[in-house]
Amino acid sequence: MKAAATPQKRRKILPKAQRRQQLIEATIACIARYGLASTTMHMVTREAGLSVGIANLHFKTKENLLRETLRYVAEEYHKGQIDIMRGREADNLSNRLTALLHFQLGRGVTQRHKMSVWFAYYGEVGARPVYQKIVSAWDRAAARELELLFASVIREGGYTDIDPGELAIGYAALIDGLHLALLVTPRELTKQNAKKIGRDFLRRAFPNHI
Amino acid sequence: MKAAATPQKRRKILPKAQRRQQLIEATIACIARYGLASTTMHMVTREAGLSVGIANLHFKTKENLLRETLRYVAEEYHKGQIDIMRGREADNLSNRLTALLHFQLGRGVTQRHKMSVWFAYYGEVGARPVYQKIVSAWDRAAARELELLFASVIREGGYTDIDPGELAIGYAALIDGLHLALLVTPRELTKQNAKKIGRDFLRRAFPNHI
DNA sequence: ACCCAGAATGAATGATCATTCATTCTCACG
DNA sequence: CGTGAGAATGAATGATCATTCATTCTGGGT
């Protein structure tokens, strides 16, 4: 008697770029579920529905895979912000501020598994200079863009006594802190409320705009 | 010929509480230097100048040691805050706000290795419910205290249109975010500047006090 | 001075994991 | 339809690590 026929998954050959993407997404899923510390190559490749060896084929080492995954996540988040800040559709500065806030605290970004991945890497930044370099490069780019936006708002509103650079750092810190609060103490803070808190921050700085 | 005499460290017997403390501090040092993921029991016990077996003697497992270490770190930080907020010396509310800010962004708390440990654990919160419970318990306590302080300030200043609970969450988020910025992009933000940003936040909310 | 409860040690064990590579399989191309 | 370049596989390997426990050592009690 033969063993019960396992539905024999047929091997599929795909372009390199596609496999890399698939592995990066599996990595994100595993980090969100099990944490950066206990994510193994077996988990990642199983999650992707592939064999163990595949990881080595496309990314030389685990370290490489983790690095590329961070690059992907960082780019996704920061590019999203920058696109909104540079956006031409919302020429109105008030609308642009609001759109930014809604992106930063909206459904897409504040999904628990996305924030988990984000902070998992932040947690290793203190010990891994490579991660710090990747994150800080994107952070700098977003901070510059935010400073420009705030400078425009300050000019338009005739606000005095506000340094756009400092306000940008403060606003970015507030948003990061709200993400952390949503992750750590979700019971105490709804996304709705987080948005209101962000909006209040902007309103106290730019009362004529918000 | 005998081997070069290693200075033969004499075995020392100490009370349990003292050894536990010693191991927790060694754990903190290792996490700060190598990260939570790659900290091993050998590292920790070597850092403490003791043998490997000692860890199992005082903490049943590695998981226990890490949990107790988080408890220690969380308590240290949050108790420091709460003590200031409840402090009787500074009966003046303005002074109390300032003292709090100086503690939160001062030399003691913002040391790189302390923030590293803090965020290392935050990074695992998404995957380890135990960590979340420990951190969120302390967070809640500090948030309640901060809300009371802000409520007093609001009453004294006759500020309208401010919800003390929401402002407390916002302020706490800002401070967390500033810690993150100090850790990730220290080049872009001095502690001096972080304090100014925190102070500006309070000033915009409580203009008569700051 | 002696003893022994239990604190401390560290070599040994077994589990887990990243990485390798001989082999199998696919499919674009002639 | 046949073929070979190279994509994909997964059992095997060796390294690392948490945990164990037989043994050694210490110091308070007598």
Image (cartoon, coloured by chain):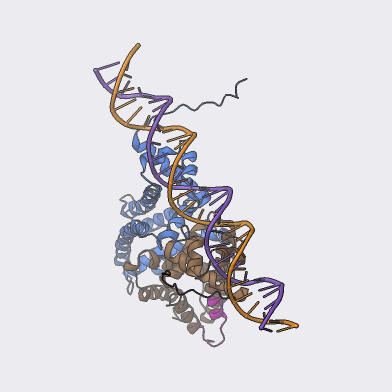
Chain colours: A blue, B brown, C purple, D orange
Q: Residue at x 41, y 41 (%)?
A: A55
Q: Main secondary structure of the magenta part?
A: helix
Residue C2, above or below A65: below
Q: Nearer the viewer, residue B166 or A19?
A: A19
Q: Nearer the viewer, residue A56 or A129?
A: A56
Residue B149, above or below B185: below
Split into 4 quadrants, where in the image is the N terminus of chain A? top right
- Where residue B57 sits: x, y (%)? 61, 65
Split into 4 quadrants, where in the image is the C terminus of chain A? bottom left
User: As drawn, is B87 to the left or to the right of A203?
Assistant: right
- Where residue A171 sits: x, y (%)? 40, 65
**In the image, which residues are magenta?**
B78-93
- Where residue B107 sits: x, y (%)? 42, 77
Can residue B161 be seen? no
The part of the image, by quadrant, that contains residue B24 is bottom right
User: As drawn, is A135 to the left or to the right of A177?
Assistant: left
Can residue B86 be seen? yes
- Where residue A186 sits: x, y (%)? 56, 58
Residue A46 magenta-drawn? no
